[in-house]
């Protein structure tokens, strides 16, 4: 069955932002964990699942958290253009978002995000060595027991994904729909696409 707004471009865009916001709030599991694609130093793509932490539809900005030692931080430092992908099988809706990511390690934004993070999340930033480092056994990748839960704050980074394009796709037995939304020079341009 088609989503209620599937024939209305403005309704589709509004619904897309609402789904993303529900994901960031933890109310819509499928929308909470998009895949982030970056470009490795050798030019190859690199994709991983991230957790959507906040959505600002007015600013067209998504907030993610990461360990500043992760490969994605280095990749985004060299090439900030990236893409996010999320698919909700139950709703048969896919979103593809293009944008540029800025990495933030200090300041009020980062301090606030750190303070609002759950203790279990903050503890993960205490892991030694950094993400992606080879280890001899799986338990070597666990945070040390005890200690100061804020000891990993220096490794915490906020990623702000500034959306420049949002592509919506509905895959249904009753007919597919596809639409694209772009913001050249900050102005919204929208159009239907062949699914």
Image (cartoon, grey):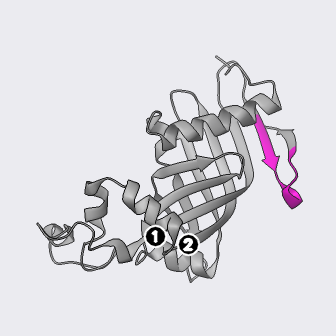
- Does residue 173 appear anywhere in the picture? yes
Q: Is residue 137 left or right of residue 70?
A: left
Q: Quadrant of the C terminus?
A: top right
What is the x, y in percent for residue 160?
59, 62
Question: Quarter of the image holding residue 147?
Answer: bottom left
The tag earlier along the polypeptide, 1 or 2, is 2
Element under disc 2? strand
**Marks 1 and 2 in Cβ contact (< 8 Å):** yes
Q: Which residue is mark 2?
A: 103
Q: How packed is label 2: few (under 14 Cα within 10 Å), some, or many (20 or more)?
A: some
Observer-nearest residue: 154 or 79?
154
Question: Quarter of the image holding residue 15?
Answer: top right
Element under disc 1? strand
- Does residue 195 appear anywhere in the picture? no
What is the x, y in percent for residue 19?
58, 35
At horizontal 47% and vertical 34% (from top left) the residue drawn is 28
Q: Which residue is mark 1?
A: 157
- Magenta stretch: give its range: 178-189
At horizontal 50% and vertical 58% (from top left) the residue drawn is 64
State whether residue 30 is above or below residue 172. below
Q: Is residue 104 left or right of residue 9?
A: left
Give the farthest residue toward the front: 108
State whether residue 34 is above or below residue 71. above
At horizontal 53% and vertical 49% (from top left) the residue drawn is 54
Question: Quarter of the image holding residue 12?
Answer: top right
State whether residue 186 is above or below residue 31. below
């Amino acid at each position: 069955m088609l989503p209620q707004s599937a024939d209305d471009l403005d309704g589709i865009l509004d619904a897309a932002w609402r789904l993303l916001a529900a994901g960031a709030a933890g109310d819509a599991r499928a929308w909470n964990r998009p895949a982030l694609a970056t470009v490795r130093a050798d030019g190859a793509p690199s994709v991983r699942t991230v957790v959507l932490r906040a959505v600002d539809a007015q600013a067209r900005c998504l907030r993610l958290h990461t360990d500043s030692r992760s490969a994605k931080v280095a990749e985004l430092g060299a090439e900030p253009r990236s893409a996010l992908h999320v698919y909700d099988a139950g709703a048969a809706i896919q979103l593809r978002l293009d944008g540029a990511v800025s990495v933030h390690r200090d300041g009020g934004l980062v301090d606030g995000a750190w303070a609002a993070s759950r203790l279990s999340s903050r503890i993960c930033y205490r892991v030694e060595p950094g993400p992606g480092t080879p280890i001899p056994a799986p338990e070597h990748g666990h945070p040390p027991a005890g200690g100061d839960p804020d000891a990993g704050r220096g490794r915490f980074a906020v990623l702000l994904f500034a959306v420049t394009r949002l592509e919506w796709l509905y895959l249904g037995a009753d007919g597919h729909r596809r639409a694209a939304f772009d913001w050249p020079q900050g102005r919204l341009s929208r159009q239907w696409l062949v699914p």
